[in-house]
Amino acid sequence: MAFLMKSMISNQVKNLGFGGGSEEKSDEGGTSDPAAAQGMTREEYEEYQKQVIEEKMERDAAFAQKKAERACLRVHLREKYRLPKSEMDENQIQMAGDDVDLPEDLRKMVNEDQEEEEDKDSILGQLQNLQNMDLDTIKEKAQATFTEIKQSAEQKCSVM
């Protein structure tokens, strides 16, 4: 099988003009049929070529889908952070058929981020932010204000 693949690749290179196709001499006695040159029947060769083309189309489709998913992610991030839109990303999504969504793991991450942002925007989120503030700083400011008020009151009132 490895010999067959090597033979097919070398024949394709020769057909492209890199191997000097005019100097090609066949082991079969000068047949120009590519199937016979590779030791296959015509039907086997055609089936093999069809299979190679189908596999290439599947790879190309998967690649286009991945590119569209990445473009979808970039579009989502641009919307989230209010960045300018990219024409190239929108074209990628359209070429994939507009049925592109974020991959499942990225969708989970985005949903988690949205939930965190919603929590921060809610009243409970604001209360939690108050708890996260530096209580020592708040106490120091309150004591300093109390001390200032006490001193000004002492200065105004001679009885104390």
Image (cartoon, helix red, strand yellow):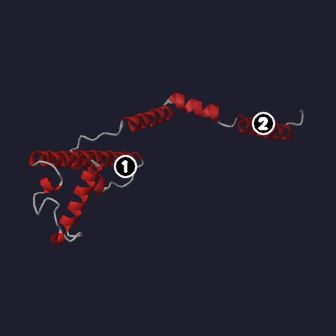
What number is the disc on residue 143?
2
* Of residues 68 and 54, the one drawn nearer to the viewer in this rendering: 54
| Rendered location of residue 82, percent (x, y) | 39, 50
Q: Secondary structure at mark 2?
A: helix
* Of residues 145 and 52, the one drawn nearer to the viewer in this rendering: 52
Give left or right: position of 53 versus 134: left
Identity of the residue drawn at 27% across and 56% down:
6
- Disc 2 residue type (three-letter): Gln
In which quarter of the view is residue 160 placed?
Answer: top right
What number is the disc on residue 62?
none
From what the image shows, is residue 28 above or below residue 146?
below
| Rendered location of residue 67, percent (x, y) | 31, 49
Q: Please identify the residue farthest to the right as the structure is shown.
A: 159
Answer few, some or many: residues within 10 Å of disc 2's Cα (few below 14, many 20 plus, some between 14 and 19).
few
* Of residues 155 and 16, the one drawn nearer to the viewer in this rendering: 16
What number is the disc on residue 74?
1
